[in-house]
Image: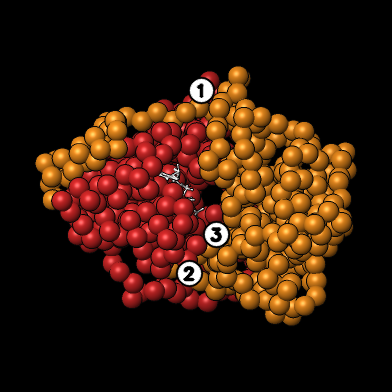
Chain colours: A red, B orange
Amino acid sequence: MDILVVLESKNGSLHRMSREAIVGAQSIAAENGLSISALAIGIDTDQIASSVSGMNLDEVLVANHNLLSTYSADGFAECVKQVIEKENPSLVFVGHTYQTRDYFPKVSARIDKPFIPDVVSLMKEGDFFVFTKTVYNGKLGSKVVSNDSECTLISFQAAAFSEENIESGSASTRSFDIELESSQVRTSSEAPIQEEVSGIDLSSADLIVSVGRGIEKENNLQIVKDLASAINGELASSRPVVDAGWLPSSHQVGSSGQSVSPNLYIALGISGAIQHVVGMKGSKNIIAINKDADAPIFEIADYGVVGNILEIVPKLTEAING
Amino acid sequence: MKIGVLIKQVPGAESALPINDNETGIQEDQASFLMNESDSYALEEAQKIIESRGNGEVVAISLGPDRVQKIIREALAKGADRGIHLQTDAKGLADPLTLAKQFAKALESEQFDLIFSGLQSDDSGMGQTGIILGELLNMSTASLVVGTELSENTLKVKRELEAGWSQWVTLTLPASISIQSGLNQPRYPSLKGIMGAKKKELKILSESEFYIDGKKQSIQKVFVPKTNKKTEMIEGEPDTIVARLVDVLKNEVKVL
Ligand SMILES: Cc1cc2nc3c(=O)[nH]c(=O)nc-3n(C[C@H](O)[C@H](O)[C@H](O)COP(=O)(O)OP(=O)(O)OC[C@H]3O[C@@H](n4cnc5c(N)ncnc54)[C@H](O)[C@@H]3O)c2cc1C
């Protein structure tokens, strides 16, 4: 086995980022003569295995065990470890999801192999794969190499590959026996809960004025609220504004908040970290105002202003209100 | 109850990040360093737990060159009981597996009941060190923690999931958890705290006491990301900018 893609179930279907990881594997497999296997672990394995059976993969492994029927970091890490030790893949791919953030570092520790997380692209240079990863909260990029010749774990950032590019084919299924005892699973989890269902729904908003830490003080929020009402838009924010308690969490846009795709998204004092951008990059038009010309938000903005929001926003509101 | 908190000193959000001559990292002498954001939430959570129990100890731990003593002192000023500095002059961004092994070697004898860390650092963003350390010290682990409830033999944590969901998970002790921002409001050091910090113990471990050889992954090159998106940068005096923005809203995005 050359590449192992570990699949994740999300509410009974294959996680979008698992599909993207398969595309990542397919993008290098053919030209380098590498085989691809996928692994479905414990949860909804029938649905997960059948959802990939029509893809261009060499094999789908299914690992069922009563201790794997709900997620635990210990159980899942042990499972992936056993598969790697038996099958010897040289690359193990997953999506950079909340679940793999939780248990892939444990796999890395248990097999003593490197885990390069949050990768956005990969390339072969000579005999080695080089992985591109953002650093400094997206302000710089980096090229990372593994120094382990046997096995490297890789997680891909959301949208590193487009799931539309998935190659179809057919894959056979094989079940894989896991040895696991209850004493090896040191955690127990309750059912997932969703907070603040009663908050505002930004997903259908057409105009969004969104504010980040650049607003500096809670008192300054009024200028952003005034702009939002001047254009009849909804008020949203980045995470630090919610963390500080200045706005309720239902206003948060991003990977741990809401995903939005308005006609217009105005980003005020928001740096453009990936966890924010994944929630708003589907916006049709993006205007960003930020005092730092190098802020990553300008990479995705249609219109950019390098300037002070405390100065420009009140003036803009005034001009609109005429 | 003894809680070790891993804190890292990283370039602050406002720091300049000039790339060094061999393009392997940044020019550290040009950067302004702060305590990593999620680490300050980890520290606050540890202090709150010890304060509500009325006994126990919070130990602030940082690895790096001498400059990192600044954030250990800051933690002591905020109320941590003592500090440990793993002193190294190693340059650049380290690999988490080797780093965690070094922490494990240095900290094993401390026998922490709990180890807290921030969920990822704002420089390399690996998001692994605290979890791997827990694994190496045979602790149970959880990442992305946004709430804690400690009882005698277990720690219940609320883990953040995608898109506004979360889940309570019960861990056996000892446990190592990584903390997400927002679960508390980190305090500022008081004047009294700053004065008192000077008298607190700050143990310095020299590299020979924790060094583990190896580098499982390396950064070959850092670079400024290029964008292929066409962005119209609106320039000029504030009034000129505002006039163009109104024009965009009216005639291009057509929302006015
Ligand atoms: C697992 C995980 C999940 C996360 N989920 C989310 C999420 O759902 N949503 C989210 O937003 N973040 C999320 N984050 C956090 C994310 O990584 C960033 O830390 C966050 O988005 C930064 O918010 P910000 O841009 O407001 O603040 P900063 O990054 O601090 O940026 C502030 C910006 O304001 C600018 N500025 C300052 N003053 C002014 C001024 N006067 N005028 C103009 N500009 C000014 C600065 O130049 C800077 O660019 C998550 C992180 C993790 C690890």
What numbered label is drawn on residue B181?
A: 3
- Respond yes or no on whether mark 3 lies under 8 Å from ligand 1: yes
Q: Is residue B168 above or below residue A269?
A: below
Q: Are marks 3 and 1 on the same chain?
A: no
Q: Amino acid at mark 2?
A: Ser
What numbered label is drawn on residue A231?
A: none
Q: Is residue B141 above or below residue A130?
A: below
Q: Amino acid at mark 1?
A: Glu
For mark 1, name the chain. Answer: A
Query: Does label 3 or label 2 sit earlier along the sequence?
Result: 2
Q: Position of residue B224 (x, y in %)?
A: 47, 28
Q: Amino acid at mark 3?
A: Ser
Q: Nearer the viewer, mark 1 or mark 2?
A: 2
Q: Position of residue B140 (x, y in %)?
A: 69, 65
**In the displayed structure image, the side of residue A85 where residue B14 appears, left or right:** left
Rounded to the nearest angstrom, the CA distance separating label 3 from label 1 is 38 Å
**In the displayed structure image, the side of residue B22 where residue A18 appears, left or right:** left
What numbered label is drawn on residue B166?
A: 2
Foreground of the two, A296 or A173: A296
* Secondary structure at numbered mark 1: strand
Q: Identify the residue at horizontal 56%, vertical 60% (top origin).
A: B180
For mark 3, name the chain. Answer: B
Q: Identify the residue at horizontal 77%, vertical 78% (top origin).
A: B54
Residue bearing the label numbered 1 = A125
Rounded to the nearest angstrom, the CA distance separating label 1 from label 2 is 41 Å
